[in-house]
Amino acid sequence: MIAHLTSANPVLVFVAEGLFFVGVAAGIAGYRLYRRPRTGRTRALMVGLGAITVACLLVASALPFFAGQSIGRPSSSAMLAFVAPRSGATLPGPTASVRVELTLDGGTIVPGSSLHLVPNEGHIHLYLDGALVQMTTDLSTVVMVPSGTHTVRAEFVALDHGPFRPPVIAEVTFDVTP
């Protein structure tokens, strides 16, 4: 969980790691007290250390989720558009080998993934009828499509596979006839 904070504010990373280590240390100290003869004082210390352990580990685990909501997604000025297929096109079927060609203005396609997000750098996710069919670094590819009416959506996403804010999307609808 803590690893997902690496692209976040360094203070949040420090706090999450600190809470994690304090929780582990409190758990170890509580366990060591557990092995000693019990008195009223050791019981109180064990309960206190147990509460500290649980609280620290829960907050350290939850922090990435709450921080992820407050940390904004990068924005991109890139523009994505379809060259092919054309919207409203009719292609011969029953199964068509559809050539998908895109243009990307103002963005750079970068291979691989990273949590170091740079605006206008990413790759393409290609969806057919809402289902992801390819993650690619090419602006040209081929998709096998059965007969019927279909929608292909392309999205230029950041290097962590998440969308830019606002999303950079292009979409076309076409038919494949038998």
Image: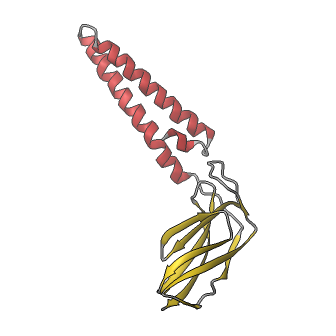
Residue 33 in view here: yes
In which image quadrant can residue 6 be found? top right
Say above or below: 57 vs 92. above
Residue 165 in view here: no
Name the residue located 76 percent from the left edge and 67 percent from the top edge.
106
**Location of residue 46 in the rendering, given as x and y in whole percent from the top left corner:** 30, 19
Say above or below: 48 vs 158. above
**Location of residue 177 in the rendering, given as x and y in whole percent from the top left corner:** 50, 92
Say above or below: 92 vs 6. below
In which image quadrant can residue 123 be found? bottom right
Name the residue located 54 percent from the left edge and 52 percent from the top edge.
70
Say above or below: 172 vs 161. below
**Location of residue 128 in the rendering, given as x and y in whole percent from the top left corner:** 51, 75
Drawn side of residue 84 relative to residue 176, left or right: right
**Location of residue 10 in the rendering, given as x and y in whole percent from the top left corner:** 62, 39
Name the residue located 63 percent from the left edge and 49 percent from the top edge.
114
Name the residue located 43 percent from the left edge and 38 percent from the top edge.
59
Nearer-the-camera pick, 137 or 15: 137
